[in-house]
Every structure is written in structure tokens, then in C-alpha cells.
Image: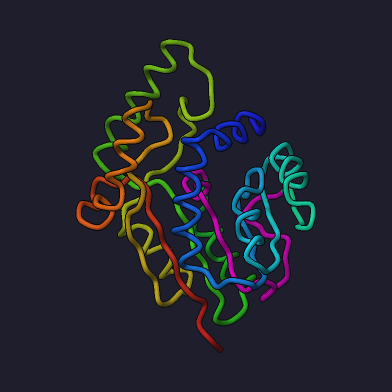
């Protein structure tokens, strides 16, 4: 899957989609500090973050993803592991990011508690994850079932038991973990799986949708800070 994942985001659509999410997450994080990327995949976000300064460590449950991430970002460190039990000391990082991995966690509450633990006081966390909407509750499951009937086997067409969050769910999880200054909003409208020219049309409309029709956006961007002690 690591090679499929990497090729997906190396396509023009993939670069536009992941680039937009990366930019939105970057807006919520300090630059030039020590970052932990949970569910780092093949190192795409770390490559972007470290290009503007700072250091980064990536963690992913997939050894294949980590191997490719090490080749992409040789100056950064990568670890195979789970975000629900982090192999890092308390207060080790200034910032934690997670892009498109949160929805696949069986215990998101544990991930956020672990994130809180490894952040320094005043540190920031920002995640982008799948949001619940008419699109994700009705259309996406229908596409999954159709893909299974047709025997289509590729990343993105298959049911991985992902969870689509509401803004209220994310807010409650961040609050219970102890974060403050929590911000939750919807983002993304141009889905990577849209065929051209639909992708280009949706991409052109994305800023307007995020600003004026956020209920149509299918990802959720959430951030918070660990209180100063």
C-alpha cells in the first residue's frame, strides 16, 4: 500500500488535495520547532514542514510507509508504532500534527491523551480528519459497496472501518484530553477521487465552499493547545 499511497499523492490531483490539507494544518502550527507527525505515511507533510525550518519525527503503523518516508526525508527520524501508545518522553515536542489518520484510530481518546503528554506546555496540536456529512454518510459507503461488487481493490475504494466525525465529537474529544483554545472547522471540497474535469471545478469552488457553505466540506480541521503550567 505504501507505493500506491505515494503514487496517489504524487499525481496532480493528489498534490493539489494533500497540499491544501497540509497548508490548512500548517496554519494552526508554529514554524521552526520540533514536530511529531502521527500517521506520517510516506513523509509528505514532514517534507513540507521541515522545508520551512524546524525538526520533525514521524510515526506510522506501516513499516512500508516508514521506509519510504525515511528515503524522502533522510534528515528526519521515523518510528513504526501506534499513535495510541507513543514511544516518546513527556514534553518532548512543541507541536503534533496528524493528516487523514485520526479517523482510522480505534481509541482516538488515547491518541489525544498521548499527544497531550508528549507536548510541552503551550504546545500545539492540529489534525485533519474525515467529517460526517450527507456525502460521507450516504455517498461514500455506496461507492465502497460498488467497488467491492466490481472487485476494485485500491486505496480509497474499500471499507476500512473509518469514522466520520462531527464537529461536536471532535470538540468533546479535544476538551476531555485537556486542550484549550480549541478550534474546529470544516475544510476541503475537491475530493482526490473526483475525475477531471469535476476535480478542477470543485477545486475552483473550494474557497467559497469553505467560507460560505462549510457543511459541504468533507474534512474537519481541529486544533488546540496544551495549557501553560
| Residue 18 among those drawn in magenta | no
Q: In which quarter of the image is the N terminus?
A: top right
Observer-nearest residue: 12 or 132? Answer: 12
State left or right for residue 146 relative to residue 212.
right
130 is higher (above) or lower (below) than 23: above
- What percent of the width, then of the height, locates residue 155? 53, 28
- What percent of the width, then of the height, locates residue 109? 49, 59
- What percent of the width, then of the height, locates residue 31? 58, 71
As drawn, the residue found furthest toward the left would be: 212
54 is higher (above) or lower (below) than 191: below
Observer-nearest residue: 43 or 48? Answer: 48
User: Residue visible at 73% across and 60% down?
Assistant: 87
140 is higher (above) or lower (below) than 182: above
State left or right for residue 88 relative to residue 217.
right
Please count the marks in the image.
0
As drawn, the residue found furthest toward the top would be: 150
User: Residue visible at 70% across and 66% down?
Assistant: 55
Residue bounds of the magenta highlight:
81-104
Observer-nearest residue: 172 or 52? Answer: 52
The part of the image, by quadrant, that contains residue 115 is bottom right
User: Residue visible at 55% across and 32% down?
Assistant: 8
State left or right for residue 159 relative to residue 90.
left
State left or right for residue 188 relative to residue 54.
left
Amino acid at each position: 500500500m505504501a507505493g500506491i499511497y505515494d503514487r496517489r499523492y504524487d499525481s496532480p490531483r493528489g498534490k493539489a488535495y494533500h497540499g491544501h490539507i497540509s497548508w490548512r494544518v500548517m496554519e494552526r502550527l508554529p514554524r521552526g520547532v520540533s514536530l511529531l507527525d502521527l500517521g506520517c505515511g510516506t513523509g509528505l507533510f514532514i517534507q513540507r514542514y521541515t522545508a520551512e525550518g524546524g525538526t520533525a519525527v514521524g510515526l506510522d503503523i506501516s513499516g512500508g510507509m516508514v521506509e519510504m518516508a525515511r528515503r524522502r526525508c533522510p534528515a528526519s527520524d521515523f518510528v513504526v508504532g501506534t499513535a495510541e501508545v507513543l514511544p516518546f518522553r513527556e514534553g518532548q515536542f512543541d507541536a503534533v500534527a496528524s493528516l487523514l489518520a485520526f479517523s482510522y484510530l480505534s481509541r482516538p481518546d488515547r491518541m489525544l491523551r498521548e499527544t497531550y503528554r508528549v507536548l510541552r506546555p503551550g504546545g500545539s496540536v492540529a489534525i485533519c480528519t474525515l467529517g460526517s456529512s450527507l456525502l460521507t454518510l450516504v455517498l461514500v459507503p455506496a461507492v465502497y459497496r460498488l467497488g467491492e461488487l466490481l472487485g476494485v481493490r485500491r486505496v480509497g475504494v474499500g471499507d476500512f472501518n473509518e469514522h466520520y466525525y462531527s464537529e461536536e465529537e471532535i470538540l468533546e474529544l479535544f476538551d476531555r484530553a485537556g486542550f484549550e483554545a480549541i478550534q474546529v472547522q470544516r475544510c476541503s471540497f475537491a475530493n482526490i477521487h473526483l475525475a477531471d474535469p469535476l476535480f478542477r471545478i470543485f477545486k475552483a469552488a473550494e474557497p467559497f465552499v469553505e467560507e460560505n457553505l462549510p457543511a459541504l466540506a468533507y474534512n474537519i480541521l481541529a486544533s488546540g493547545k496544551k495549557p501553560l503550567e
